[in-house]
Amino acid sequence: MAAALEARARGIEVLLLDENLAPGGQVHRAVGGFHRPEPRAPGAAQAREGLRLIEAFRASGAEARFGATLWAVEEDRTVTWSEGGVAHRARAGVLLLCPGAIERPLPIPGWTLPGVMGVGAAQILLKSAGLLPEGRVWMAGQGPLLWLYAAQMLAKGGRLAGILDLSPPGGWKRAALHLPAALTAPGYLLRGLGWMARVRRAGVPVIRARALAAEGGERLTHIVFDGRREAAELLLLHDGVVPNTQITRALQGCAHLWDAAQACLRPVLDGWGNTTRPGVLVAGDGAGIGGARAAEFSGRIAALEAARRLGTLTGEQRDALAGPLLLRRQAELAPRPFLDALFPPLPAADIPDETLLCRCEEVTAGRVRAATALGAQGPNQLKAYLRAGMGPCQGRVCGPAVHAVMAAARGVPPAALEGLRTRFPSKPVTVGELASLA
Amino acid sequence: MFRRSGPTDCTIAWEGREIPARAGEPLAAALLAAGIAAFRETPVSGAPRGPLCLMGACFDCLVEVEGVPNRQACLVPVTPGMRAAPQRGARGAL
Ligand code: FES
């Protein structure tokens, strides 16, 4: 949205395609609708920013299509998307992709049982439909979103049986090194500490745990951790978020690299957001996790670069306009190394063999390790041994976990493995949708 | 599992059973609010599954909507009177 606003201000025609049903992405989802925190409630300041952005976007004259799923990008930047079962095509002078983030998978034994969900998923239910968890509800994992959601749902009258803190020990010690940089943007830290304090005040038990498993038949009934067994109706897992690279990885010639700090793949970009594919840019968390405000600045910076490419700005004009934005983005990113050190992704080597890694094709960590021992070098070769990553999710969910498990099994750094390639259509397409293109 | 903090304004049918819903909310939210945890059975082992991500990534929320299979319940908005059913077995050509 920020990019569309900036582009419109430079006189560029904008077509925005959004798979969601309304503007706002995941963070500003349903803001002003169901997501309307009380003035002092957790997440309220962010909601106000979101509302301002959406209002400005609506007045900007950008053409927007919601419920529009992009599933193919051709060499000449012709994009194909589906909307309500009908496919459409359009050619872009410049294509700016803003695929956002998805939750990093936290594979544990039994995580495929109904009743086990992501913390981000529960937050979407709260924002888009006002749903609050009830009954024996547990949260497990680590990361800022876990604490934000816990604080949000408690403020709205939700209940929690407990939080299992799975963060590797020594986090604060590791993170202390990055504290000075993080303190240049103290708002982040204070908000985070505020969420934690709210959870503790509510009397929710916070338990340090290591091994966790979910149990049940038709649905979740129990969780087991460190020898304890507790009744559970809902288990919400979280281990941070990673860039959604489903579209960019399917683009021929769009290079990606393994980000060791955030343990995920991200597209190779220059400071403007240009990928290695001419005329295709990426902005926001899809380029590397930076949060909603950094995403806003990246979007505007990329829009200025788009304007230069389209000839409505000269190089100097772009530089002059982008200067302050680049500085503000840098300030927003200052706390990231601290957070990355505090919440390093959970180690893949600890995932028990019986855990399903690939949910679509039901492939366990043990089988992935066995295939690796037989000679599968990386996620792309693994497909020849097992169908991991070949189900409808195309590795969206299991990709980072399979990658990390194979690297650990081979005893090499994850960066040494080639990332799982994806293909178009990046979402299942019906015969009817294909026919509608003819 | 979940309770609503806001009102409903319509009903939808899940396997012919009427459940309350709110027009425009994700179909997955209406089902979860009605206590339905399992949305489908996997084609590989027949294991029950329910939504994981609510944002269109995991495909564990696949259901049949108005007789059309392979719809992601987290991305389909509720319309009054909508008919949906669990997706069982083969996912067919994708
Ligand atoms: S819940 Fe993951 S795709 Fe719908």
Image (cartoon, coloured by chain):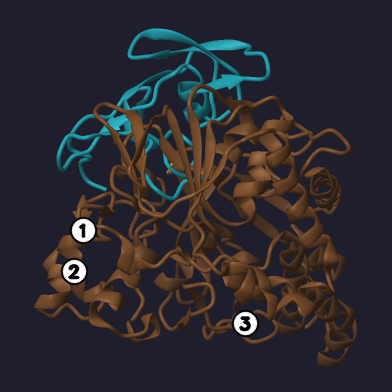
Chain colours: A brown, B cyan
Where does the image place residue A324, in percent across and percent down from the top left? 89, 79
The answer to whether residue B83 is above or below residue A416 is above
Contact? badges 2 and 3 (CB < 8 Å): no
**For numbered disc 1, what is the local secondary structure?**
loop
The amino acid sitting under disc 3 is Asn
Q: Quadrant of residue A99?
A: bottom right
Give the label on residue A274, or none: 3
For disc 1, the neighbor class at 10 Å (few under 14, some 14 to 19, many from 20) is some
Viewer-nearest residue: A163 or A124: A163
* Residue at the disc numbered 2: A369
Where does the image place residue A233, in percent across and percent down from the top left? 42, 27
Q: Chain of mark 3?
A: A
In this picture, residue A54 sits left or right of residue A252? right
Q: Are marks 3 and 1 on the same chain?
A: yes
Q: Chain of mark 2?
A: A
Residue that appears at 51% across and 75% down = A266
* Residue at the disc numbered 1: A353
CA–CA distance in space, label 3 to label 1: 40 Å
Residue that appears at 73% across and 37% down = A201
The amino acid sitting under disc 1 is Asp
Q: Which mark's residue is nearer the viewer, 2 or 3? A: 2
The amino acid sitting under disc 2 is Arg
Viewer-nearest residue: B19 or A95: B19
Viewer-nearest residue: A54 or A105: A105
Q: Mark 3 or mark 1, which has the lower sequence index?
A: 3
Q: Chain of mark 1?
A: A
